[in-house]
């Protein structure tokens, strides 16, 4: 299909250059799967206890339903705008802009949070060799290298992400196998019988589990650059969710098992894998895991710049930002201005927090919590938009409506966990300053979407431009479906015009 020019990018990006494995690597990079077992498993264990593995499993199932809704669009069209363009098509421009701004915040704040993690781990690493660079220097180093790779070439970015995340996951699975072998490959009955676990604990654990999966949909921003996008992107969206979920379930089981019977508690360890490696007599693997966590943080910074820049890029081409942000580099064929802006913002915010003497670990927690609101908003909107869109094109089935309802119902759990219910023991109101974050996010949406409404009043054609651009993308893929002899192999079988 790409050789025939039917999938040539209409936005100036490097079309059809990424095979499935590199598209999958983009989603893995933003998920940063090793950071959950390496740093956050204890936080989930505090709530879910022996049901930590079950929280992981339920989280995976819930997000599979969300991915099914995303793929209703991704199997029919593809563009750098990702969920933003999907929701414009399903629910209209205003809902699409809400999603676009939510995604921009989600990806930027994810990048900021993991950049803090990168600087934090780098401080420890450099300290071992007697070098003590400033936090600002480390933040600039991580953001600068990631900017260059995203600016230079999407293929360079995607291959780097795939290699870094693949090697890190393989090493952690090896450590997990060693820990389980050291315990004689026993079946941990307290875990399998959910001893001491409550439904409320499982539900609270889900809040952090969803944060661990956030970004699985980021492959959908590679609509112009992926090969056979109607096939590779849906496979990457679902595949990253399933593979990450299985990895989380296995590592949750192994880590809880590893701490059972020891003097230490999983709930008290910020680096549980390092402790387990020492307990199993393979301390060197623990050091390698710490290095892998550092690498994964960097990969997530790079992985967050790519989708943030592409959503910026598409919104600018629709008139929501200055037109220059919607331009591509003539040689690199990357959205270079959008990449530069995204990278600069990812550096400036955590650097400012550092100058205000906010600890890197605290900054990571604050920024990571805020990014969750952006992802949850986008996931709920796309789950509402999917059945509406399918109804309009005459393809809605009962199963599609059920998937949408299940996805929305599942997303309500982490929303309640983040916002809280006054007087509730299951979903208590978060402690300060986290209790103010929902209001900060609503203020952010009020300002950004209010600006869109002002733009719409001043220039009504902005809506026409947006809708026409997105309709052209859908029409282009639909017209390809009408040429089965040329592109039939690249068309998703569920496409309504396949026949």
Image (tube, grey):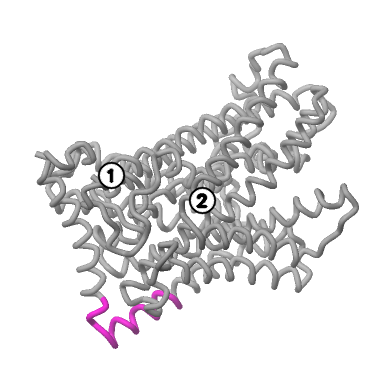
**Residue 424 in view here:** yes
Count of all numbered marks drawn on residues in the image: 2
Estimate the x, y position of residue 343 in percent, counting from the top left: 57, 66
Residue lying furthest front = 331
Towards the viewer: 54 or 4: 4
Report whether 344 appears left or right of 57.
Answer: right
The region drawn magenta spans 447-462
The residue depicted at 72 percent of the width and 37 percent of the height is 289
- Which numbered disc flags the more N-terminal residue, 1 or 2? 2
Callout 1 crowding tier (Cα within 10 Å): few <14, some 14–19, many ≥20: many
Towards the viewer: 99 or 492: 492
**Residue 404 in view here:** no
Callout 2 crowding tier (Cα within 10 Å): few <14, some 14–19, many ≥20: few
The residue depicted at 69 percent of the width and 65 percent of the height is 140
Q: Which mark is residue 467?
A: none
**Vertical comparison of 368 with 240: above or below:** below
The residue depicted at 19 percent of the width and 49 percent of the height is 390
Q: Report which quarter residue 397 is drawn in.
A: top left
The residue depicted at 38 percent of the width and 52 percent of the height is 222
Estimate the x, y position of residue 358 in percent, counting from the top left: 75, 66
Q: Which mark is residue 156?
A: 2
Image quarter (top left, top right, bottom left or bottom right) of the N terminus: top left
**Residue at disc 1, secondary structure:** helix
Write down the residue under mark 1.
Answer: 230
Q: Report which quarter residue 324 is drawn in.
A: bottom left
Estimate the x, y position of residue 32 in percent, counting from the top left: 58, 45
């Amino acid at each position: 299909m790409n050789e025939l020019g039917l999938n040539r990018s209409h936005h100036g990006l490097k079309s059809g250059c990424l095979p499935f494995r590199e598209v999958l690597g983009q989603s893995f990079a933003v998920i940063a799967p090793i950071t959950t077992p390496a740093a956050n498993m204890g936080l989930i264990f505090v709530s879910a206890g022996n049901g930590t593995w079950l929280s992981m499993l339920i989280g995976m199932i819930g997000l599979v339903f969300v991915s099914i809704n995303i793929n209703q669009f991704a199997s029919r069209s593809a563009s750098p705008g990702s969920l933003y363009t999907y929701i414009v098509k399903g629910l209209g421009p205003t809902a699409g802009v809400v999603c676009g701004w939510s995604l921009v915040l989600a990806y930027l704040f994810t990048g900021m949070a993991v950049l803090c993690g990168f600087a934090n781990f780098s401080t420890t690493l450099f300290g071992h060799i007697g070098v003590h660079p400033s936090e600002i220097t480390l933040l600039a180093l991580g953001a600068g290298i990631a900017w260059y790779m995203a600016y230079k070439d999407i293929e360079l970015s995607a291959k780097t992400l795939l290699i870094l995340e693949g090697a890190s996951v393989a090493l952690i699975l090896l450590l997990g196998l060693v820990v389980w072998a050291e315990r004689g490959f026993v079946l941990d009955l307290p875990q399998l019988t959910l001893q001491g676990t409550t439904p409320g604990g499982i539900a609270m654990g889900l809040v952090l589990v969803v944060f661990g999966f956030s970004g699985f949909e980021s492959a959908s921003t590679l609509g112009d650059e992926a090969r056979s996008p109607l096939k590779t992107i849906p496979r990457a969206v679902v595949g990253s969710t399933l593979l990450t979920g299985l990895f989380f379930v296995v590592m949750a089981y192994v880590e809880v098992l590893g701490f059972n019977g020891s003097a230490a508690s999983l709930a008290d360890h910020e680096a549980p894998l390092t402790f387990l490696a020492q307990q199993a007599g393979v301390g060197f693997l623990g050091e390698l895991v710490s290095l892998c966590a550092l690498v994964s943080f960097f990969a997530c910074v790079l992985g967050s710049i790519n989708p943030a820049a592409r959503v910026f890029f598409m919104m600018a081409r629709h008139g929501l930002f200055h037109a220059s942000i919607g331009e591509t580099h003539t040689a690199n064929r990357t959205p270079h201005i959008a990449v530069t802006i995204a990278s600069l913002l990812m550096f400036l915010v955590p650097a400012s927090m550092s100058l205000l003497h906010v600890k890197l670990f605290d900054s990571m927690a604050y920024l990571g919590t805020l990014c969750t609101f952006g992802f949850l908003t986008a996931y709920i909107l796309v789950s509402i938009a999917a059945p509406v869109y399918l109804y309009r094109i005459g393809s809605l089935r009962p199963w599609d409506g059920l998937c949408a309802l299940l996805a929305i119902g599942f997303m309500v759990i982490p929303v309640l966990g983040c916002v809280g219910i006054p007087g509730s023991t299951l979903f208590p109101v978060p402690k300060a300053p986290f209790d103010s974050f929902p209001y900060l996010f609503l203020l952010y949406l009020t300002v950004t979407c209010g600006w869109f409404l002002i733009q719409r009043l001043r220039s009504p054609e902005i809506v026409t431009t947006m809708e026409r651009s997105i309709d052209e993308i859908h029409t282009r893929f639909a017209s390809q479906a009408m040429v089965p002899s040329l592109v039939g192999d690249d068309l998703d079988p569920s496409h309504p015009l396949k026949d």
